Amino acid sequence: MTSSSKTLRAVMLVLRIALGAVFVYAAWTKLRTPWELFAMSIDSYQLLPLKAVELVARTLPWFELAVGLLLIAGFCLRSASAATALLLAVFFGLMVRAYAKGMEINCGCFGANDIISWKTLLRDGSMLAAALALTVLSFVQRRNATAR
Amino acid sequence: MNMRLGALALLLLWPALAAVSDIDPNKTAGNPSAPVTVQIFSDFECPACKVFHDRSLPQLQRDFVATGKVFLVYREFPLPIHAHSREAANYAVAAARLSLYQPVADALFRDQFAWSVNGKVWDTVASVLTLSQQKKVKAAADGPSVLGEILREVNLGHAVPVTSTPTLVVSRGSKTYPVSGTLNYAILKSLIDDLLK
């Protein structure tokens, strides 16, 4: 194993454990409370009809948990990292829209009391960058493995 | 005999009252022994609080308070960003001393747009009080008792922590959930129904 591939593996390990832990924590903060609390946060974005709000509030935390566990375990890494990047891109887009419209709402990221601000945008933007990097690296690693 | 009955009533209600500390009995609605307690941390000058007061609160009162399922507790949480909300809270809490919290709160939310612009909070408050009541409310509004109560409730809000208004703290027994955001009534109703199961 070359030193560059060692570095690549180390960077990927750090990224997937960090992102996985964040996703598991985000899921846990939602699943330990009634789904209605997360539904209130989703409804605050004023984008979805009530039925869709309920569906997302009931299912998204389980999806976050699954993705987080896959990242930590390192299973289906390309799919899990791509799903993570896609989710974070959607979350980030919605938060930027709310912030630009001056909506002082709870972002719904980690339960209650997480009002959208430049800090939450910076945090989620960094996570999105990390997820994109992990996705690219996981595909690069696969290509290198296939080429050998 | 009456004292014994009073002591017995207090003993029976104590668990419900102890669950929510520092309650001003004149700023409540419903049965104190109701299974669910909803504390409303609100600011008279906040537009979202007016929307909640005008739209969701009447439904909450009809479906749950009038039926004895929810005990409502009103909490003051005047935000520093609003120029007149502290003054409005002072008058409302002073009016509560005369059991007139609700009519004053209703008037303050009804005329919110006007007094938040022109600053004439007292005119709105006075419009629902008699002359004698006006004197008492005016005298009490800046007193240490009223100011102390508001400070206690703001501190309670910070402990939740309340980060936006209105915030509801919905509790049953050891389960306590702060709820903020649009406070969509259908979702709030679902939460309370689940807690009542």
Image (cartoon, rainbow, N blue to C red):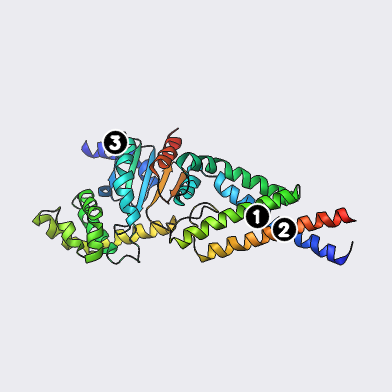
Q: Do callouts 1 and 2 mark residues in contact (Cβ within 8 Å)?
A: yes
In percent of the image, x 47 and y 49: which residue is there? A47
Q: Picture coordinates of residue B54 (x, y %)?
A: 29, 47
Judged by depth in the image, the label closer to the viewer, 3 or 2, is 2
Q: Do callouts 3 and 1 mark residues in contact (Cβ within 8 Å)?
A: no
Between A120 and B195, the residue placed more toward the observer is A120
Q: Distance between the residues labelled 3 and 1?
A: 48 Å
Q: Which amino acid does label 2 sit on?
A: Leu
| Chain letter for the residue marked with disc 2 in the picture | A
Same chain for labels 3 and 2? Say yes or no.
no
Question: Relative to A30, does residue A129 appear above or below in the rendering?
Answer: below
Tell me where residue A129 sits by quadrant: bottom right
Tell me where residue A88 sits by quadrant: bottom right
Between B43 and B90, the residue placed more toward the observer is B43
**Total of numbered circles in the picture?**
3
In the image, B38: left or right of B84? right
Same chain for labels 1 and 2? Say yes or no.
yes
Q: What residue type is labelled 1?
A: Ala
**Image quarter (top left, top right, bottom left or bottom right) of the C terminus of chain B:** top left
Mark 2 crowdedness (10 Å alpha carbons): few <14, some 14-19, many ≥20? many
Q: Mark 2 highlights which residue?
A: A134
Q: How far apart are marks 3 and 2 (CA)?
A: 55 Å
- Residue B153 shows in the view: yes
Q: Which amino acid does label 3 sit on?
A: Ala
| Chain letter for the residue marked with disc 3 in the picture | B
In percent of the image, x 84 and y 66: which residue is there? A4
Q: Mark 3 highlights which residue?
A: B66
Which mark is on residue A9? none
Q: Mark 1 highlights which residue?
A: A85
Q: Picture coordinates of residue B91 (x, y %)?
A: 22, 59
Q: Identify the element where label 1 is drawn.
A: helix
